């Protein structure tokens, strides 16, 4: 079996990719975390019940996984790759890095 790997993307790269319509951000944090603070354009597929089939068709975009710190997003990417999906990118540093970079979040829906 080929060794899977996950490529790190910076918050700036991910934000720009989303703005340009190149990236689909998949947030693998739990609903209670997302309720407190969310990525502006993220789709939530919690890691606790993670099923790669629940990720919507990215329609030509690259899927980028994100979480709080960058650990669960790697786990999700590897799980997706094990399911045969080419999703090998994640947001390095997660929400913590995103906020440290001064990027916007959505709070308290």
Image: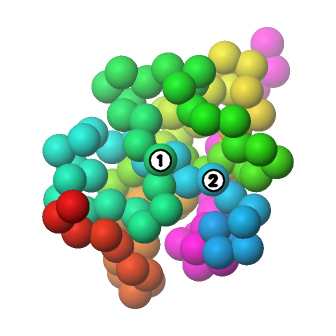
Front-most of residues 92 and 99: 99
**The stretch drawn in magenta includes residue 56:** no
The coloring applied to the image is: rainbow
Answer yes or no: is residue 103 visible: yes
Q: Residue drawn at (64%, 67%), measured in percent from left and top?
A: 18
Above or below, comparing residue 74 to residue 95 in the picture: above
Q: How many marks?
A: 2
Q: Give the mark nearest the N terminus, 1 or 2.
A: 2
Q: Mark 1 and mark 2: span between their CA atoms? A: 8 Å
Q: Residue drawn at (36%, 21%), measured in percent from left and top?
A: 49
Q: Residues within 10 Å of mark 1 (few under 14, many from 20)?
A: some
Q: Residues within 10 Å of mark 2 (few under 14, many from 20)?
A: many
State left or right for residue 81 relative to residue 33.
right
Q: Residue drawn at (47%, 47%), measured in percent from left and top?
A: 43
State left or right for residue 8 relative to residue 38.
right
Q: How far across and how far down the image is residue 37, in percent? A: 25, 63
**The stretch drawn in magenta includes residue 11:** yes
Above or below, comparing residue 109 to residue 58 in the picture: below
Where does the magenta region start and end?
A: 1-16
* Residue that label 2 marks: 24
């Amino acid at each position: 079996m080929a060794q899977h790997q996950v490529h790190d993307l910076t918050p700036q790269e991910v934000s720009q990719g989303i703005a340009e319509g190149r990236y689909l951000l998949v947030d693998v944090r739990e609903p209670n975390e997302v309720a407190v603070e969310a990525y502006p354009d993220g789709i939530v597929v919690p890691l606790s019940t993670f099923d790669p089939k629940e990720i919507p068709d990215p329609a030509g975009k690259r899927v980028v996984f994100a979480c709080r710190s960058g650990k669960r997003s790697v786990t999700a990417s590897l799980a997706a790759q094990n399911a045969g999906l080419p999703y090998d990118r994640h947001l390095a540093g997660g929400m913590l890095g995103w906020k440290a970079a001064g990027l916007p979040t959505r709070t308290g829906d």
